[in-house]
Amino acid sequence: MRYRVLRCFSLVAIMCFVIPFSSAQDKTKPAPKPEKPKRIVVGQGQVKFVRLTGDEIEVLVRVPVRKGRGIQYKEQKQSFPIAKDVQVRVKNPPLAFDSKGRPKKWTADELQKFKGPDPKAWGYTGSLNMLKQNQTIHAFLGKERGAPRDAKPEIFMIYILDDVVQ
């Protein structure tokens, strides 16, 4: 009797240890880690677009100024270099009108096409030509990964948030 209990106990113990490890071997390889971004974000913020000159962008930045006990904001012009591979994204898809002059509704496939290669990215693809004076944009400043410390940051991504404010 004692021998039978010992044999049953050892069989249960073996099953507890062997079955979990055998199922772990059946699993497929884990997915590869995503590639690290090419740039390190140094700063970002909402600014008003002024103009594009060559490979630089000029913007109005709101700078906080202490006045007495309160804080007021003063607009200051600043220019930043633009990366060669700058990404421009817009909030809404492009407008198109049908033959009767009404705005066209885009299909899901067309909207997916406007999204570009990365469907999870914010907004829709755009270009630097879409920038107009006094538009509010969200600019991302960054440096190349592995760049020297004293390298000047450049704008590598722009989100166009709204249309021109009159």
Image (cartoon, grey):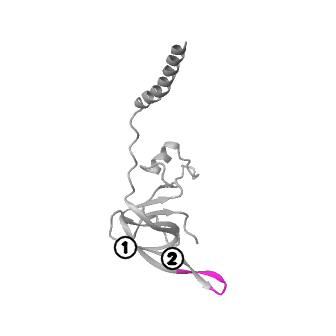
Local packing at callout 2 (Cα closer than 10 Å; few below 14, some 14-19, many 20+) is some
Check the image and name the residue furthest to the top. Answer: 1
- The boundaries of the magenta stretch are 67-75
Distance CA(mark 1)–CA(mark 2): 19 Å
Residue 13 coordinates in the image, percent (x, y) = 50, 25
Check the image and name the residue furthest to the right. Answer: 69
Q: Nearer the viewer, residue 42 or 52?
A: 42
Camera-nearest label, 1 or 2: 1
Q: Is residue 71 magenta?
A: yes
- List the residue tagged with mark 1: 152
Residue at figure coordinates x 43%, y 31% from the top left = 24
Question: Which element type, helix, strand or loop, lies under badge 1?
Answer: loop
- The answer to whether the residue labelled 1 contacts the one labelled 2, judged by CB atoms less than 8 Å apart, is no
Task: Tell me the number on the disc at residue 60.
Answer: 2
Which image quadrant is residue 56 in? bottom left
Q: Which of marks 1 and 2 is nearer the N terminus?
A: 2
Residue at figure coordinates x 41%, y 29% from the top left = 26
Q: What residue type is labelled 1?
A: Lys
Q: Does the magenta stretch include residue 157?
A: no
Q: How many marks?
A: 2
Residue at figure coordinates x 52%, y 76% from the top left = 61
Q: Which amino acid does label 2 sit on?
A: Leu
